[in-house]
Image: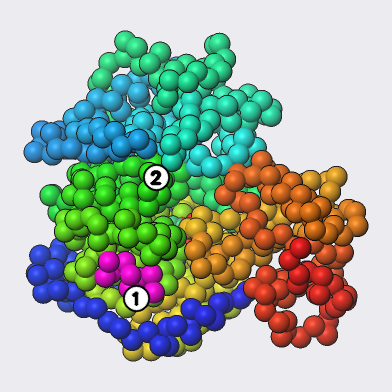
Amino acid sequence: MSTSTSAMESLLVENRVFPPSEAMVKAARVSGMDGYNALCAEAEKDFEGFWARLARENVVWNKPFTRTLDESNAPFYQWFDDGELNASANCLDKHIGTPTENKVAVIFEADDGTVTKTTYKELLARVSQFANALKADGVKKGDRVLVYMPMTLEGVIAMQACARIGATHSVVFGGFSAKALQERIIDAGAVAVITSNYQMRGGKELPLKAIVDEGLGMGGCDTIKTVYVYQRTQTACNMVAGRDKTFDEALAGKSTECAPVPVGAEHPLFILYTSGSTGKPKGVQHSTGGYLLWAKLTMDWTFDLKPEDVFWCTADIGWITGHTYVAYGPLAAGATQIIFEGIPTFPNAGRFWQMIERHKCSIFYTAPTAIRSLIKAAEGDAAVHPDRSDLSSLRILGSVGEPINPEAWMWYYKNVGHEKCPIVDTFWQTETGGHMMTPLPGATPLVPGSCTLPLPGIMAAIVDEVGNDIPNGTGGILVVKRPWPSMIRTIWNDPERFKKSYFPEEMGGKLYLAGDGAVRSADRGYFRITGRIDDVLNVSGHRMGTMEIESALVSKTDLVAEAAVVGRPDDLTGEAICAFVVLKRPMPKGDEAKAIAKELRDWVAKEIGPIAKPKDIRFGENLPKTRSGKIMRRLLRSLAKGEAVTQDTSTLENPAILDQLGQAY
Ligand code: WT7
């Protein structure tokens, strides 16, 4: 395990503090540190009572629960398990007959700038109609449905329609390859795929259905009965008779009313695949009741959502952020939200700022990578600077997915928030379902680059390798000591891996291991994430397993003998992927090396997806190994950074190859 020291060093020098304004404190739902502390005290005093109260107040139950937390089969915790509900009803039906029914639920802005507004009532009708289409084809409660959609309203409709009939969705991000899609279809045993002919990004028309066809063609996907194709563009795509149908065909003659199917609170709402420390992605399984509670509640707590807010989370529905803070949370909370199909740099890098002005966005939630790239763009071209747009509608800013460096934080705070909008730096994971640690806008004094404190009821702590608490000011391993409602329930098809990955015996088997290092400040006890302690990389906020990329590289058996992948810091993307490769042929030089590197990058794009392409590829005749044959990854990390190797190399079998691997071709 390694913890990055640079983040810890900056903690020592970071002493700027930004308390919330008095007006913000006064108007906030969780008001001041007193408000925050009162909730924490309630959770400490009566843990189950605290969660039961919140679950009664924030979720509409078809059948009320009588058991709050069942720990008898830990770590397979169950929450509210004898209660019944429907997630879609909690997002849509619940607003019918209230003033929210005619409120705009979604402002959709297409890649080309076309804007469409959909009210809650209209959205309910569209979701219900699609749910009826699924039902007509025999999709039923408990079935898995794979969603491979562009960032459009139809993607959210697909997810909600599944939830409505109790089908478990598994969304795959549009940047994953046919092979990745096929593996997920097989693992989940999906009965249907919901996709689109093409997707529009940055003015380009990119295929989606063709990738589905390729994935299904790879074999093993016989469980798939139907492929639904949303016609996003006019361009025709291949349609397989008897299997494929367009949305129009599927929806024809279907009623716009569909009774939501109540499911048990523990019923799997979705599976979302994410990277871990082995080559195989993990199907993170989430519940319905606990997940929905946290999606709704964190909208209220973290974003202090008010009825007049216009909320915008820029994440794609292919990631957990797009599940909780696009497809479920904002709807459960009755918000008006913006959904954006395109990319932040098209037609120019002022797009986000122009959209905030155009739609009077008041809560803006994005990733540090986006902020860093827009800083760079604004510094190079005044025309795309946030100053060119009227951002006065903003009241709260958010950051998610990776550590935000204090420089980017300050720029965001000054140039986007004009020093009046708190930044909620939300730390969480695919596995946690929703926010774990974050400042609250009307309570927590902000420190740039710190996610500050856990939400009430979240028992986060920092421990050593065997699970003992360690003092503030010392870096250690981030854990959560008690279960929480929106936590991962298991890894689909692999409960043993779930136990091993998240509740390791070495630490007593009771602590949830996040996989990150962290340190708490000596003065305030604020948390700062220092980075992953396993073999997981965070590239532009996208989670990638080094082993996954290594397996992809070595599967190119005609060329690659051995490969090791590590991360190195990158100013723009946070981390960059660096691959060390031993070829089954003599060391290439110059143009030949370049050509082989390109071939390997394209191969990885085909195996996993373009997002996994290594930025650097270094060739060597061997990898640095200990005498027992273990690859010395710490050493590779130094080489990737371009640092002189200062580690002890006395156990190294073959020191000469360090020179080779240290050189870019
Ligand atoms: C990993 C989880 C958060 C949902 C989207 C990403 C890193 C996430 C922060 C933050 C520092 C962060 C962690 C975590 N991370 N948020 N605010 N500060 N690091 O979910 O793909 O499951 O990745 O992202 O390393 O473990 P994910």
- The residue positioned 61% from the left and 76% from the top of the image is 2
To which residue does mark 1 refer?
A: 448
SS class of the residue under badge 2?
loop
To which residue does mark 2 refer?
A: 346
Q: CA distance from mark 1 to mark 2?
A: 29 Å
Q: Nearer the viewer, residue 547 or 255?
A: 547
- The residue positioned 61% from the left and 68% from the top of the image is 568
Q: Nearer the viewer, residue 52 or 658?
A: 658
- The residue positioned 13% from the left and 71% from the top of the image is 25
> x and y percent of residue 637 in the render?
67, 72
Residue 646 is tagged as none
Identify the residue at the far right of this view.
586
> x and y percent of residue 441 in the render?
22, 67
Q: Which residues are magenta?
A: 407-415
Local crowd at mark 2 within 10 Å, few (<14), some, or many (≥20)? some
Q: Main secondary structure of the magenta part?
A: helix
Q: Nearer the viewer, residue 394 or 163?
A: 394
